[in-house]
Amino acid sequence: MTAARTLFQKLWDAHIVKSNDEHRDLLYIDRHLVYEVTSPQAFEGLRQRGRRPWRSSTILATADHNVPTKNRETGIKDRLAKAQINQLSINCEEFDILEFKLNDPRQGIIHVIGPELGATLPGMTVVAGDSHTSTHGAFAALAFGIGTSDVEHVLATQCLLVTRLKTLKIDISGLLHAHVSAKDLILYVIQQVGAGGGSNHAIEFTGEAVRALSMESRMTLCNMAIEAGARVGLVAVDDKTIDYLAERPFSPSGKQWTAATRYWKSLVSDDGAEFDRTISLKAEDIKPMVTWGTSPDMVAPIDGAVPAPEDSESSDQQSSVRTALEYMQLDPGTRIIDIRIDKVFIGSCTNSRIEDLRSAAKVVNGKQVAKTVLQALVVPGSGLVKAQAEAEGLDKIFMAAGFEWRDPGCSMCLGMNEDRLNPGERCASTSNRNFEGRQGAGGLSHLVSPAMAAAAAIAGRFTDLTES
């Protein structure tokens, strides 16, 4: 009788080309996603060695990190961004790779467009030169970020030598309260596990709370598995997975669809499968969450307060808290609801899908951004998301409230493009990282859900949605 296997083991075993040693395997890569920042050196490496991509049909490309999100019709003003984006097009044309350019309605953040086009499918291995490739694990795909040298290796060989990961099962029982989202759930998980708690692991999210999530919410969950130190986040296939993928442009059809879905349904952890670690959490314990520090695990519920360094157990933790509070310009004991914000960013590969925009629009409908808020941005994750939102009138709701409605891109998530914080500006952000300077040198970032960001924009400070 075949031994019970975890979902991770099934995906890993199905892609082994060769076992290199007892710790590493050469894996076949099904889908390679490239963008303008980490790919130029890889393509140049191919040229220098006289190589071409092994299977260009498996590669999708788009510019997202450094693209302007407004006034695109006037051209790209930033010289570095322009050079990167132009070079991506040159590389894709030379090597016969499908690219969604800025004028293509399918252009957007790579981790948004892959799933919405059906280019990410259950059972795949998916890689990109970006750590948040873990997003695609919501579809029971073995998805992880790789470095620039690895990008070239995958382009040239369609394979990658990877160290085997341990498995961590995070089981969330019960159901989330109203006004508590997948973003709050993953911030809570990171708080419980720690920023490095999942190091060298693949996390599989299970339990009633996870099964109740939509596919877009599951993507948010897996997107930030990396912030718990894991390399991979996974959710098993169920009817929601299959329904989401039906009739997507890159999804199989006809007899291939029938065969594919039959296989996809096997992509679950077997009963009795053993994980290296298991953590059990209760959904009803989770409230809307707000980060207060410079790591995603420095987070508190909306009815909580900023901790004091002395509240931490070890001297190293106390030092980290002290440094974070100094950078964030916060005093211990400050109530989260007393923290005022200067800017609001709704977007990123974590929270820029249509459901995210709907939840934010519901909060701001008929209201006005506080006069103390300097800027409030809504940046759809793709051209298709933007078109859907505009068809539903969400853009009008946001603009009437005082938000700026932008074109797709990573925008203020990482301070690489024109959208960034100035020193000392405090931001309610739906992105995934709150490191020092992440959204701009000296910027102060607080991670929240789209609804919480929208509420903060209206109130000018963080506010408890559960009391509305």
Image (tube, grey):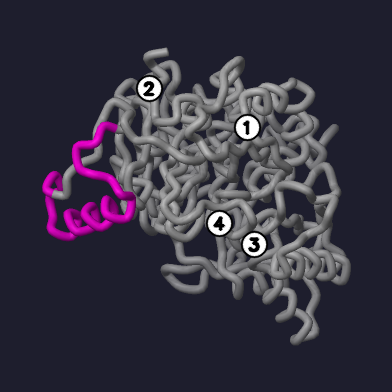
Q: Nearer the viewer, mark 3 or mark 2?
A: 2
| Nearest to N terminus: mark 1 or mark 3 | 3
What main secondary structure does the magenta stretch of the protein show? helix
Which residue matches tag 4? 415
Q: Position of residue 214 (x, y in %)?
A: 57, 26
Closer to the camera, 245 or 309? 309
Q: Is residue 32 left or right of residue 299?
A: right
Which residue matches tag 1? 403
Q: Residue at the location (43% across, 24% down)?
A: 180
The reply to whether discs 3 and 2 touch (Cβ–Cβ < 8 Å) is no
Provide the secondary structure element on which disc 4 rests.
loop
Q: Nearer the viewer, mark 1 or mark 2?
A: 1
Q: Position of residue 161 (x, y in %)?
A: 55, 70
Badge 3: how crowded within 10 Å, few (<14), some, or many (20+)? many
Q: Nearer the viewer, mark 1 or mark 3?
A: 1
- Where does the magenta region start and end? 310-335
Q: Position of residue 9 (x, y in %)?
A: 49, 50
Amino acid residing under circle 2: Asp
Which residue matches tag 2? 464
Q: Is residue 335 left or right of residue 454?
A: left
Badge 2: how crowded within 10 Å, few (<14), some, or many (20+)? some
Which residue matches tag 3? 28
Amino acid residing under circle 4: Gly
Q: Is residue 135 left or right of residue 307?
A: right
| Nearest to N terminus: mark 3 or mark 2 | 3
Q: Nearer the viewer, mark 4 or mark 1?
A: 1
Q: Position of residue 150 (x, y in %)?
A: 60, 71
| Nearest to N terminus: mark 4 or mark 3 | 3
- What separation in Å lies between label 4 and label 3 (alpha carbons)? 34 Å
Residue 200 visible in the picture: yes
